[in-house]
């Protein structure tokens, strides 16, 4: 997915200034697609060049003019064309998994500490998602047509965080069991690749 499509997805609902778009992006799509405000502003300029968005300049007294971005019909058509195409499964790039994979060189304790740190981060994100679910999706069993799609996206995020927390617990338990076995002299845990 290109950043352009993520921006267009937000502009489908209403126009945004660049500033408001970056804030909204961070609080919604930013949960699963990362972009800096510089990247977003660069992409907005490209979208304007392609005539996928228009910009209305709103003068402000004593402050820089506001630039309000709106999606055009051409931009909407481009988004629909993209959205109806099949997409690939995303490649996983998780730094912690590389560390765990090669954890034998570092030792159990530092890897367990990092796993527990990740568990805490995922638990905090899950709590945030649950709060969003309570605040914006009170009718979870019967979401409206407008709410069903954002709700399904949120549900994917919730399940993702739950899975990470469960994996962190499983990994910690497995590593601690291996450490106890070594302490009792029962030998090391066999590698999956031996």
Image (cartoon, rainbow, N blue to C red):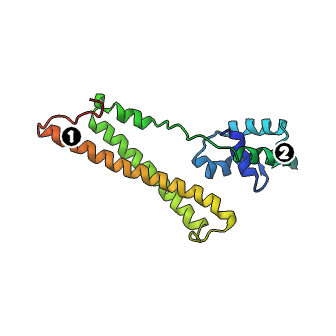
Q: Which of marks 1 and 2 is in front?
A: 2
Tag of residue 60: none
Q: Is residue 53 above or below residue 145?
A: above
Can you tell which quarter of the image residue 181 is in?
Answer: top left
- Work out whether residue 89 can be spotted: yes
Residue at the location (76% across, 51% down)?
11
Percent across and percent down for residue 9 are 71, 49
- Quadrant position of the N terminus in the picture: top right
| In the displayed structure image, the side of residue 32 where residue 69 appears, left or right | right
Residue at the location (59% across, 55% down)?
153
- Quadrant position of the C terminus in the picture: top left
Residue most toward the left?
185
Q: Tag 2: Cα neighbours inside 10 Å, few (<14), some, or many (≥20)? A: few
Q: Which of 87 and 130 is in front in this view?
A: 87
Tag of residue 74: 2
Residue at the location (45% across, 50% down)?
122
**Disc 1 or 2, which lies upstream in sequence?**
2
Q: Nearer the viewer, residue 89 or 22?
A: 89
Can you tell which quarter of the image residue 33 is in?
Answer: top right
Report helix, strand or loop for mark 1. helix
| In the displayed structure image, the side of residue 183 where residue 70 appears, left or right | right
Q: Name the residue under label 1.
A: 179
């Amino acid at each position: 997915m290109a950043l352009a499509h993520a921006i267009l997805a937000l502009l489908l609902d209403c126009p945004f200034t660049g500033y408001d778009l970056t804030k909204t992006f961070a609080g919604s799509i930013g949960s699963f697609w990362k972009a800096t405000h510089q990247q977003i502003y660069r992409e907005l300029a490209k979208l304007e060049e392609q005539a996928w968005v228009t910009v209305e300049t709103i003068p402000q007294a004593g402050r820089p003019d506001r630039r309000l971005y709106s999606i055009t019909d051409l931009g909407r058509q481009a988004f629909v064309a993209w959205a109806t195409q099949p997409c690939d499964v995303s490649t996983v790039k998780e730094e912690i998994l590389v560390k765990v994979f090669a954890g034998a060189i570092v030792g159990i304790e530092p890897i367990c500490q990092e796993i527990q740190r990740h568990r805490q981060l995922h638990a905090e994100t899950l709590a945030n998602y649950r709060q969003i679910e309570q605040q914006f999706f009170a009718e979870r069993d019967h979401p409206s047509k407008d709410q069903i799609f954002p709700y399904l996206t949120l549900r994917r995020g919730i399940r993702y965080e739950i899975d990470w927390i469960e994996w962190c617990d499983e990994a910690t338990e497995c590593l601690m069991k291996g450490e106890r076995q070594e302490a009792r002299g029962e030998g090391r845990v066999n590698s999956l690749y031996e």
